Amino acid sequence: MTLTPKGYHAEMFERRQKESLANDLILGLKDVQDYMKGVCYDAVAYVLHLQNSADITYTDVINTNSNDWMNTFSSRREWTGASIPEGTAVGFYRTISGSFFHAALATGGTRVRAINGLTLGAGWINEVNLTTALGARNEDGTYNHDRTKIRVYLMSL
């Protein structure tokens, strides 16, 4: 990803200021794209970096791009439709291709924020309710989305 001038400035913040900025981003009070340029995976990683830069360092931020972030997450569990803790990374996995195609950040409940994801989060400021966007979960644990089956994973570092 590429940081904007605001993003580079935020790197000089003390820990508490970074956490406050991360909270403002999660709440939608600020737009993540004012701080970084990239795709959905980058946006999620950037906010997680602000929350805890020990897990995702500045070096990681400037050297990791796009879908490569998905390899950073050490654990994944399938979403069952239950409430998702605020600040949890959410990965969307297309079963037919066997790969992730989108990422978002949970804002609490079943809501997420993302960029570049159309119905799964096209603009950071607008929350998406996954229950509404995805509908009912299929018996096999998948969801129907964009004329294909997907799985939704809650991910942690």
Image (spheres, helix red, strand yellow):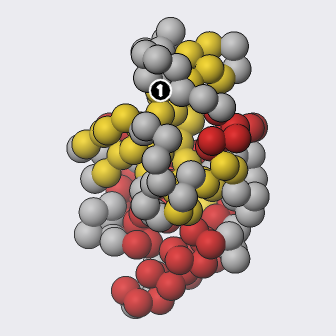
- The answer to which of 60 and 133 lies nearer the viewer is 133
Q: Is residue 19 above or below residue 79?
A: below
Q: Secondary structure at mark 1?
A: strand
Q: Is residue 103 above or below residue 148?
A: below
In the drawing, does residue 19 fall left or right of residue 52?
A: right
Residue found at the far top of this picture: 96
Count up the numbered dots.
1
Q: Residue at x 44, y 81 (%)?
A: 19
Q: Is residue 72 above or below residue 5?
A: above
Residue for badge 1: 151
Measured as percent of width and height from the top left, residue 38 is found at 61, 49
Measured as percent of width and height from the top left, residue 129 is found at 66, 49
Measured as percent of width and height from the top left, residue 97 is found at 49, 12
- The answer to which of 156 and 138 lies nearer the viewer is 138
Answer yes or no: is residue 4 visible.
no
Q: Residue at x 40, y 72 (%)?
A: 51
In the drawing, does residue 53 fall left or right of residue 41?
A: left
Measured as percent of width and height from the top left, residue 28 is found at 68, 70
